[in-house]
């Protein structure tokens, strides 16, 4: 069983990208998994009990394989919000009538891993690093398939060396947070169609192409270049089954989606989204904002206010660079469009 589909038990090599911060839904996961792809849920904000509940809910929703995604913590991240951290955002809080948060709410990574082992979802993927060897060994004993994420060839080699089952080659075209972990983000910005063939040549485990893939042409191109499967994020984020707010989905399908930027403003970690007023206003202070999760805690009230009021100018409009190519707004129909474009595997170059 060497292919990604064989290893994960899915019918079609299409993975729905996992979304963090409340943008994932069990319904979207279920639609994709029921359709023969791999539905995913970004669970990095959930605590251990939240993950146990999530996996149970996913099993109730679908009998097919699904994926739970976690972030690997970064060393030296702040555990508190300092008064000075909020100085650039105070005008927004004042204008919106919001109160500054007093602390940081984060999930315990060890508790998350323990919950994963207890609940044993079919597939677990990681970004921003590799889980430790003890977890990988324990997960294997429980039959959990493990997927790592790489933004460079060196990271992909590290994922394979750690004993994971597959690697997502995530190009700089991808929306949302960057997953670099061996070198700084600015040294790890490799375009998807430069990254995929190099990773496919460097590792023996299945390669999942991600970033800038939103229609059948992207699917066919990625797999011709050596990918064994594709991961589509923004296209599924734009469907009605995702947890994105109506205004976010609307902007993803507008001409505004043609312009995306990399920014630390919304969370303290670098992520790709559609440019708006707060991104432009805060751009001069990119290097001054605190690291994740402090900056994320400061921005959550502003982001939530923007979503409630349909204000795209203060919202984290995560998007990859191919949003304009996304198909149907219904996840099931969109998945069928992507499946229809899968190429003849006999022409794949590896």
Image: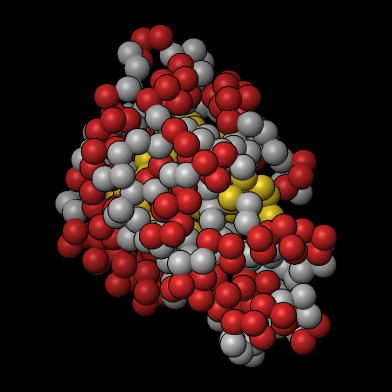
Q: Position of residue 44 (x, y in %)?
A: 49, 65
Q: Position of residue 70 (x, y in %)?
A: 49, 59
Q: In this orientation, which residue lies closer to the viewer: 64 or 185?
A: 185
Say left or right for 234 vs 162.
left
Q: Is residue 78 above or below residue 250?
A: below
Regarding residue 340, the answer to whether it shows in the image is yes
Tell how many labels: 0
Say left or right for 306 vs 7.
right
**Residue at x-position 63% and y-position 65%:** 267
Q: Position of residue 84 (x, y in %)?
A: 81, 83
Which color scheme is applied? secondary structure
Q: In this orientation, which residue lies closer to the viewer: 222 or 95?
A: 95
Q: In this orientation, which residue lies closer to the viewer: 20 or 283?
A: 283
Say left or right for 216 vs 168.
left
**Residue at x-position 76% and y-position 44%:** 186
Q: Is residue 255 above or below residue 350?
A: below
| Res. 335 image quadrant | top left
| Res. 193 image quadrant | top right
Q: Position of residue 212 (x, y in %)?
A: 52, 34
**Residue at x-position 37% and y-position 69%:** 51
Say left or right for 88 vs 240.
right
Regarding residue 199, the answer to whether it shows in the image is no
**Residue at x-position 63% and y-position 24%:** 194
Q: Is residue 193 above or below residue 309?
A: above
């Amino acid at each position: 069983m060497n292919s990604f589909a064989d290893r994960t038990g899915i019918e079609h090599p299409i993975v729905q990208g996992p979304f963090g911060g409340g943008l994932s839904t069990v319904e979207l996961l279920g639609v994709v998994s029921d359709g023969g792809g791999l539905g995913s849920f970004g669970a990095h904000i959930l605590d251990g009990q939240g993950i146990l509940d999530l996996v149970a809910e996913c099993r109730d929703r679908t009998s097919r394989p699904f994926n739970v995604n976690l972030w690997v913590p970064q060393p030296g991240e702040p555990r508190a919000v300092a008064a000075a951290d909020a100085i650039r955002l105070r005008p927004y809080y004042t204008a919106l009538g919001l109160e500054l948060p007093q602390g940081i709410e984060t999930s315990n990574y060890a508790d998350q891993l323990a919950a994963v082992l207890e609940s044993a979802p079919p597939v677990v993927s990681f970004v921003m690093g590799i889980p430790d060897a003890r977890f990988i060994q324990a997960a294997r004993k429980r039959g959990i398939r493990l997927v790592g994420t790489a933004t460079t060839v060196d990271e992909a080699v590290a994922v394979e060396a750690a004993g994971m089952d597959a690697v997502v080659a995530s190009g700089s075209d991808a929306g949302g947070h960057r997953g670099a972990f061996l070198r700084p983000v600015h040294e790890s910005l490799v375009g998807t169609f430069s990254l995929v063939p190099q990773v496919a040549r460097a590792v023996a485990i299945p390669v999942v192409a991600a970033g800038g893939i939103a229609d059948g042409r992207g699917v066919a191109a990625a797999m011709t270049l050596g990918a064994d499967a594709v991961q589509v994020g923004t296209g599924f984020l734009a469907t009605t089954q995702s947890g994105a707010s109506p205004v976010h989905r609307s902007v993803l399908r507008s001409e505004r989606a043609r312009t995306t930027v990399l920014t630390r403003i919304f969370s303290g970690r670098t992520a790709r989204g559609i440019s708006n007023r707060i991104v432009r206003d805060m751009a001069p202070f990119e290097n001054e904002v605190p690291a994740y999760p402090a900056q994320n805690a400061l921005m959550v009230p502003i982001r939530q206010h923007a979503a409630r009021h349909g204000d795209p100018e203060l919202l984290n409009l995560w998007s990859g660079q191919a949003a304009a190519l996304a198909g149907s707004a219904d996840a099931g129909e969109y998945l069928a469009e992507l499946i229809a474009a899968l190429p003849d595997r006999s022409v794949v170059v590896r």
